[in-house]
Image (cartoon, rainbow, N blue to C red):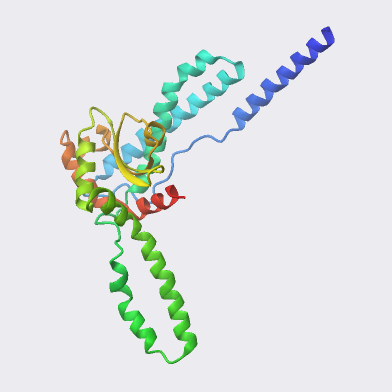
Amino acid sequence: MLCRVGQLRRCAASLNQSINQIAASRQKHTLPDLTYDYGALEPHINAEIMQLHHSKHHATYVNNLNVTEEKYQEALAKGDVSAQVALQPALKFNGGGHINHAIFWTNLSPNGGGEPQGLQVVTVLFGDRVGTMLNMHHKKQRRELSQKIRREIIDKHVKGELMEAIKRDFGSFQKMKEKMAAVTVAVQGSGWGWLGYDKESGRLRIAACANQDPLQGTTGLVPLLGIDVWEHAYYLQYKNVRPDYVKAIWNVINWENVHERLQIAKK
């Protein structure tokens, strides 16, 4: 009997050691690099805001998330449920802060703004090229150009799906902007305004989340486009005039990224 007790103790010690090794070897979260310079979004968002927002605020969420996850792994290894529960708010806040900002940076681009590409571009873009193909005498040349046109038409059609979804669910691009701006500006205190995808209905939805609550974990919507309305995102430039900041940020929205997120969400 004593032998079996000793075996169980050794197994438990080995299991705890394995858990600790897994926790220690877990890859830590890191601050993602931006694909553009801090000053690239000026005059809409100035370099000082971007530098502080990315290298200080986002970095703090990442660091605190790593610390919290280490403490959570220790609590799991000890079977300390009370400690696990106590760490949940920190996981939600810092994990949400990291998730939200990682999306936010890619939603922005110095080449952004305007509107998502529409399906009507196809006719204008390919009319002349189809004429060129018909005037070709060599069958191979006609076939190659035909295949290229077909591929590009498919690509343009896919990229036009975001605009078509916006028109379907909000009436027009302008109405979507107005609704999202209103919801975002109305966030009490700190939080985010979101354009998300509802997998169940296949529709686009607009929602607001308080603090750093992640959209998908809070509402079930897949995040496509987020606007950060914590004061650190705009105060140095726009002071307390949040509507001016929200109006300006549309000039740097990366619709290519939003479109890509929609395609992934629909799979």
Residue found farthest to the top: 2
Q: Residue at point 37% right, 89% down?
A: 135
Image quadrant occupied by the N terminus: top right
Q: Residue at point 31% right, 64% down?
A: 119
On the question of residue 80 being in view, the answer is yes
Which of the 4 quarters of the picture holds residue 234?
A: top left
Image coords of residue 62 (percent x, y): 44, 33
**Left/right of residue 254 with respect to residue 250 in the rendered view:** right
Note whether 217 is above or below 141 in the view shown: above
Residue found farthest to the bottom: 137
Residue found farthest to the front: 201
Image coords of residue 27 (percent x, y): 56, 36
Q: Residue at point 23% right, 32% down?
A: 187
**Left/right of residue 188 with respect to residue 161 in the rendered view:** left
Nearest the eye: 158 or 16: 158
Label tally: 0
**Left/right of residue 180 with respect to residue 202 in the rendered view:** left
Note whether 221 is above or below 146 in the view shown: above
**Left/right of residue 78 with respect to residue 202 in the rendered view:** right
On the question of residue 44 being in view, the answer is no
Image coords of residue 204 (percent x, y): 32, 46
Nearest the eye: 26 or 93: 93
